[in-house]
C-alpha cells in the first residue's frame, strides 16, 4: 500500500514539474490561471450586472474556486488512461494510478489558490471565525467525491470514448445548477429538493456557510456525500481491477 501511494506521489511530483517547465512563468500559472478565471466572472457580474457588493463577490468567488477544482479534475482525470496510452503499453502500472495522479496534482494547485483566497479575506470586512476549523473536513469530503467520480469515468471512458462529449455537457449543466451564481435556499422547497440532489451544490453551500457566515457544516449531509462517494469509488476500484489487463489492448 505504501508503494502504491509513493507511486502516485512521485508521478504527481513529476507531473507538476513537467507542467511548470512548459511556460516561462512556470508555477506562477497555477495562480494566474484561476485568478484570470475568477476575474472574468467578477468583471461580468460587478461591472455588467452591477453586483459589486462585497458579500456577493465573496459569495461568487467561493463557488467558483470550489467548482474549478471539481470540474478541472473530473475533465482531466476521466481522460487519464487514454492520455497515458503510450506509458501504459511500455510498463505495467495499476491503472487507477493515472486518475489518482491527476487528482493529486489538481488538489495541490487548489490548496495554493485556497490559501491565497483565505488570505484575501483579511482585506475584506468578513472576519475569520472558529467555523473555519471545519474547512479540512469539507475539503476531504470533496476530495473523496472528486476521486470517486474521476476514477469511475476514467475506468469506463476507454470503452465508450463518446462519453467525453456527454461528460462535458453534464459538467456544463452542473455548473449552472450548483448554486455558483445564486443562493439555492431562496428557491421554493419544491425546487430545492431537486437541486440538493447534486452533491456539489451542497458542498458549495457549506463552504459559503463556513467562510461567510461562520456556520459549521451539516454533518448528516457530509456523511451522506461521503457514503455516496465511497460507494462510487469502490465500484471504480472494482472496474480497474477487473479490466486491468484489458485496457492496454483497447487503448492505442
Image (cartoon, helix red, strand yellow):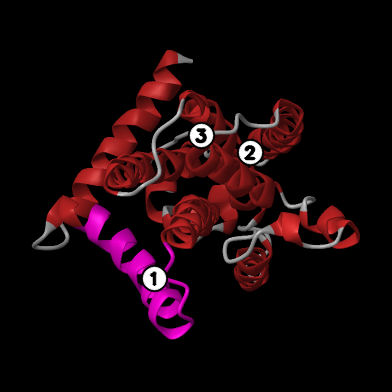
Locate residue 81, reporting x and y percent.
50, 51
What secondary structure is found at the residue carrying circle 2? helix
Locate residue 48, reporting x and y percent.
43, 85
Locate residue 252, reporting x and y percent.
49, 61
Distance from disc 1 to disc 3, alpha carbons, whole Å, reads: 24 Å
Query: Of the residues under marks 1 and 3, which one precedes in the sequence?
Result: 1
- In the image, which disc is placed on residue 197? none
Residue at mark 3: 139
Q: Is residue 85 left or right of residue 227?
A: left
Q: Is residue 179 left or right of residue 38?
A: right
Q: Look at the magenta stretch and give its main secondary structure.
A: helix
Q: Is residue 32 left or right of residue 185?
A: left
Query: Of the residues under marks 1 and 2, which one precedes in the sequence?
Result: 1
Q: Residue at x 36, y 22 (%)?
A: 6
Q: Is residue 29 left or right of residue 195?
A: left
Locate residue 159, reporting x and y percent.
67, 59
Residue at mark 2: 240
- Neighbours of disc 1 within 10 Å: few (<14), some (14-19), many (20+): some
Residue range highlighted in magenta: 29-53
Residue 104 on the magenta span: no
Q: Residue at x 40, y 38 (%)?
A: 104
Residue at mark 1: 42
Which numbered disc, 1 or 3, marks the residue closer to the eye?
A: 1
Please identify the residue farthest to the top as the structure is shown: 2
- Neighbours of disc 3 within 10 Å: few (<14), some (14-19), many (20+): some
Against 216, residue 158 (above or below) is: below
| Foreground of the two, 26 or 87 | 26
Please identify the residue farthest to the bottom as the structure is shown: 48
Against 4, residue 26 (above or below) is: below
Please identify the residue farthest to the front as the structure is shown: 125
Amino acid at each position: 500500500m505504501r508503494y502504491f501511494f509513493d507511486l502516485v506521489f512521485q508521478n504527481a511530483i513529476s507531473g507538476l514539474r513537467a507542467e511548470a517547465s512548459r511556460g516561462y512563468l512556470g508555477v506562477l500559472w497555477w495562480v494566474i490561471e484561476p485568478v484570470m478565471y475568477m476575474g472574468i466572472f467578477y468583471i461580468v457580474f460587478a461591472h455588467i450586472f452591477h453586483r459589486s457588493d462585497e458579500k456577493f463577490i465573496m459569495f461568487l468567488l467561493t463557488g467558483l474556486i470550489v467548482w474549478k477544482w471539481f470540474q478541472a479534475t473530473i475533465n482531466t482525470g476521466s481522460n487519464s488512461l487514454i492520455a497515458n496510452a503510450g506509458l501504459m503499453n511500455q510498463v505495467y502500472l495499476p491503472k487507477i494510478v493515472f486518475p489518482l495522479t491527476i487528482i493529486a496534482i489538481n488538489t495541490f494547485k487548489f490548496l495554493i489558490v485556497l490559501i491565497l483566497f483565505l488570505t484575501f479575506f483579511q482585506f475584506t470586512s468578513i472576519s475569520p471565525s472558529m467555523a473555519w476549523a471545519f474547512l479540512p473536513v469539507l475539503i476531504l469530503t470533496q476530495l473523496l467525491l472528486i476521486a470517486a467520480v474521476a476514477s469511475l469515468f476514467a475506468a469506463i471512458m476507454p470503452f465508450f470514448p463518446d462519453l467525453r462529449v456527454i461528460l462535458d455537457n453534464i459538467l456544463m449543466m452542473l455548473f449552472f445548477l450548483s448554486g455558483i451564481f445564486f443562493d439555492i435556499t431562496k428557491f421554493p422547497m419544491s425546487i430545492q429538493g431537486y437541486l440538493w440532489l447534486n452533491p456539489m451544490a451542497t458542498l458549495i453551500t457549506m463552504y459559503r456557510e463556513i467562510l461567510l457566515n461562520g456556520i459549521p457544516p451539516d454533518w448528516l449531509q457530509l456523511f451522506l456525500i461521503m457514503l455516496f462517494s465511497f460507494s462510487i469509488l469502490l465500484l471504480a476500484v472494482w472496474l480497474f481491477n477487473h479490466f486491468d489487463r484489458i485496457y492496454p489492448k483497447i487503448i492505442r
